[in-house]
Amino acid sequence: MRDRLNQSLRHLPTWVVYIVGTLPAPWLFYQGLTGGLGVEPIKALEHEYGELALQLLVFSLAITPLRKFAGINLLKFRRAVGLLCFLYVTCHLMVWLVLDVQIPGQIWADILKRPYITIGMAGFLLLLPLAVTSNNWSIRRLGPLWRKLHRASYVIGLLGAVHFILLVKGVQIEPLIYLALIVGLLLLRLPTGRAASSGRVRRQGV
């Protein structure tokens, strides 16, 4: 079953993931224009884009544990998932900047005064270099530094979840579930006892 799934995934072109993953962006915008997102379409659009970005971020963090623990190999789609996450984060930000706040002075004041916006903006700024270097040329040029740079996705995931928790009013379960998923996925990346011991031995040159 697992081998059959991996074989099917190997034959699935990456461009399909890009196309399918991009489709919700214009569809949601159209829904906002035509009243399909309720009485506050701008807020709803902002929320939908932001939540899709967080879901894609969780999915990207799950790819390595899925291969390690379940044997399901989605590595060929990791770049596409990461770039789609960046697309929806950018859409989320642009709706807030262009359609919601609009006033440059107010935007800057909100970034400084509202912690959830400060945290969200920090996550976006950390995500920028990851999106820019998500290409083969950067991987070749940066070498081992590329892998270290892209570990920033762990911090971005936590920032995204905290941004969501602070954004909602009161204590709500959904943002806490995202935080729990991200923390759980990060814990799964910790080396096991034997692997950690091997790593320490290698570092000590024994």
Image (tube, rainbow, N blue to C red):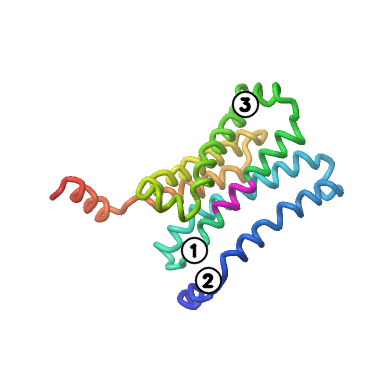
Between the residue at mark 1 and the residue at mark 3, the CA separation in whole angstroms equals 36 Å
* Horizontal relation, residue 40 to residue 183: left or right: right
| Residue ID for mark 1 | 76
Q: Position of residue 135 (x, y in %)?
A: 49, 53
Find numbered disc 3 in the image and state the secondary structure of the residue it sits on.
helix
- Specify few, some or many for label 2: CA neighbours under 10 Å numbering under 14, 14-19, or 20 or more: some
Q: Is residue 85 magenta?
A: yes
For image coordinates 44% across by 46% down, the residue present is: 150
- Judge by depth and name the residue closer to the eye, 133 or 199: 133
Amino acid type, mark 2? Leu
Contact (Cβ within 8 Å) of mark 2 with mark 1: yes
- Specify few, some or many for label 1: CA neighbours under 10 Å numbering under 14, 14-19, or 20 or more: some
Q: Where is residue 28 in the image (x, y as percent from the top left)?
A: 76, 51
- Judge by depth and name the residue closer to the eye, 146 or 33: 146
Above/below status of 5 relative to 185: below
For image coordinates 70% across by 21% down, the residue present is: 105
Q: Position of residue 100 (x, y in %)?
A: 75, 33
Residue 9 is labelled as 2
* Horizontal relation, residue 141 to residue 107: left or right: left
- Specify few, some or many for label 3: CA neighbours under 10 Å numbering under 14, 14-19, or 20 or more: some
Q: Position of residue 132 (x, y in %)?
A: 52, 46
Counting residues from the start of the chain, the first of labels 1 and 3 encountered is 1
The mark closer to the camera, 1 or 3, is: 1
In the image, the segment drawn in magenta is 82-88
Query: Mostly what secondary structure, the magenta segment?
Result: helix
Residue 111 is labelled as 3
Q: Is residue 143 magenta?
A: no
